Image (tube, rainbow, N blue to C red):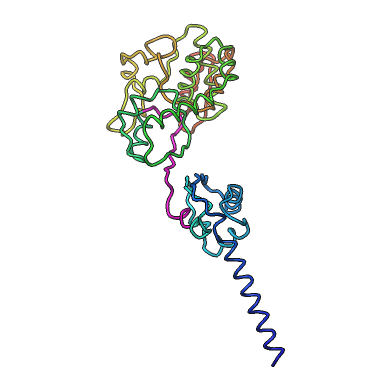
Amino acid sequence: MKKFLAIILIFLLMFIVTGGLWKVQTSPVSSDENARVIVIPKSEGISSIAKRLKDDNLIRSELTFKIYARQNNLASRIQAGSFKLSPSMSISEIANVLTSGTDDVWVTFIEGWRVEEMAEKLNGNLKIDNGQFLKLSKEGYMFPDTYLFPKDAEVEYITETLQDNFNRKYADDLKKKIKAKGLTEKEGVILASLVEREGRSDKVRTEVAGILLNRLNIGMKLDVDATVQYALGYQQSEKSWWKRHITKDDKEIKSPYNTYKNPGLPPAPICNPSLSSLEAVANANPNTQYLYYYHDSKGNSHYGKTLEEHLENVANNP
């Protein structure tokens, strides 16, 4: 009987000790109530989150947080975004904040969108006024990417963020290569915007950039469908800013952007190009033998040195 009681006392003592230790480990790190903004990227794992919280002195133990997360199924409940946390919060309070809703909204801008499409996206996600965004944005220089914006973000902040990102991506090495092609920095962006709409992969974009440079160098009109699409504007019947099928009459539209009617590059970019398209211009071969390209309905690209070859490609590859 005494042995049995001793065993019970040992288990009771262990329960008290471990329970007390758990309570300490899940308690606030300090009384400091100064909030810190912690950004949780999409698909970040619990181990990485625990390390981030420990590095920022917001929890006492990574292991304790991971155990708590497993017990409370936090992995499927923690949201991506930014959160305000302080060392005065316990692990349960931190978990509640991380699962109750972020202060921000993720917004993804697709490569090749024009500023009007970006405005529509922002209006849908953040209720940003389209007109104000269009007034402050600059076609071609609003870098397409995924951004985390505060729910109450001002239009000025958003446009500056997109343009700052573009300036970082359009680095000096790219500008130097583009200038070596005989283009100004602005012309490089304009050509990249055409390439973005005309090419479907990194390889094709580079080939298309070379062909368009070749046309520019010999004084040939660019004849780029995307510039006509840009000039035509919004298509109510298709609910799109980019008309699906360009007709012969469409190519007659009077616009400085219509490269079927005007020699050289259009006066400004027609969309917001990706880094891939900027690199395609920088790395293009302007001495390519090809002057024509054609993309068939299956997404394959065909190139021709002469108009006759080009017409054969069109006829043989619907």
User: Do we see residue 221 in this rendering?
Assistant: yes
Residue closest to the eye, 222 or 137: 137
Residue extent of the magenta highlight? 96-115
Image point 38% across, 32% down: which residue? 118
In the figure, is residue 240 to the left or right of 215? Answer: left
Percent x, y of residue 156: 38, 29
- Residue nearest the viewer, comparing 226 with 190: 190
Q: Is residue 43 above or below residue 149?
A: below
**Residue 70 image offset from top left, x and y in percent:** 56, 62
Above or below, 206 relative to 24: above
Question: What residue is shown at x 57% (from left), y 27% (from top)?
Answer: 203
Q: Which image quarter holds the C terminus?
A: top left
Q: Tag count in the figure?
A: 0
Q: Is residue 160 above or below residue 68?
A: above
Q: Residue furthest top?
A: 219
Point out the residue furthest to the right here: 3
64 or 204: nearer the viewer: 64
Is residue 283 in view from this perspective? no
Residue 112, by quadrant, is top left
User: Is residue 161 located in the magenta-colored stretch of the structure?
Assistant: no
